[in-house]
Amino acid sequence: MKRILVYCEGPTEESFVKNVLDPYFWSMDVSVSPKGASGVSKYSVIKKELTRHCKHDSTTMITTMLDYYGLPNDTPGISTAKGSIYDKVEHIEYAVKKDLGELANLIFNLSLHEFEGLLFSRVSAFDIVADKKQIEALEKVHNDFETPEHINNSYNTAPSRRIKEIVPSYQKIVDGTQIAQSIGIDEISAKCNHFKRWLEKLIAWAKDYK
């Protein structure tokens, strides 16, 4: 069986990979496993760990779910990124991959702006934790932005903080995973272009791998 290892920002992303992304790839004979990051506050740590994972097993595809929001300031490309949010994040991803030496089994990926942004792909899925008034408030946030991935890059306005403000009972790991399961990978990718491009890269690798 082909293997993808996802180097994750934290336990919420690990749960998403294990319970949502992995089952999506079963029909392609691909196993997708999460790997918690030792620390993402320093780029040097990210670089060291990704290099180690890639060289440990060249037959496994290594990829990442790291937040664009809160990315270490010394990350390659971050100070020179310009244009749209998609232009910026792709510029940084390319710069990091180049800095790591073009490792053949690495797809470096950033989440815009963090995992919880994906959950705005279908706000009604919050009905497992939110009442009608809260869902309406979440819908208003969704409608204020071009896409779920445009919600939004600061300490006070990041998607997870917006959700927690509106739905105080929201539990990131359990609820976030269940909401993502309810929405489904296909609908998330239809609403979130950068996530879609990441998914397409992983699928292409799975199909080409021999």
Image (cartoon, rainbow, N blue to C red):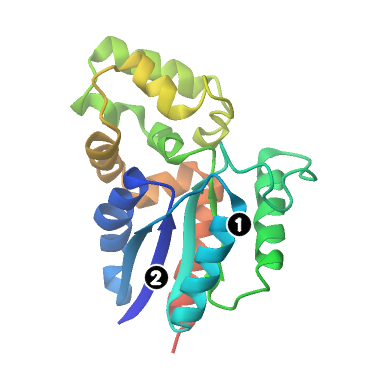
Percent x, y of residue 65: 46, 52
- Amino acid bearing label 2: Ile
Could you say which disc has been placed on residue 4 in the image? 2
Percent x, y of residue 152: 56, 28
Q: Quadrant of residue 85?
A: top right
Vertical order, 149 against 102 (above or below): above
Q: Quickly name the residue at label 1.
A: 44
Q: Residues within 10 Å of mark 2 (few under 14, many from 20)?
A: many
Question: On the picture, is 101 further left or further right than 156?
Answer: right
Give the residue at x 72% y 39%.
84
Point out the image quarter for the N terminus.
bottom left
The local secondary structure at tag 1 comes to helix
- Amino acid bearing label 1: Ser
Give the residue at x 48% y 39%.
114
Give the residue at x 49% y 34%.
148
User: Distance between the Cα atoms at labels 1 and 2?
Assistant: 23 Å
Nearest to the observer: residue 126 or residue 62:
62
Give the residue at x 54% y 33%.
147
Nearest to the observer: residue 53 or residue 184:
53
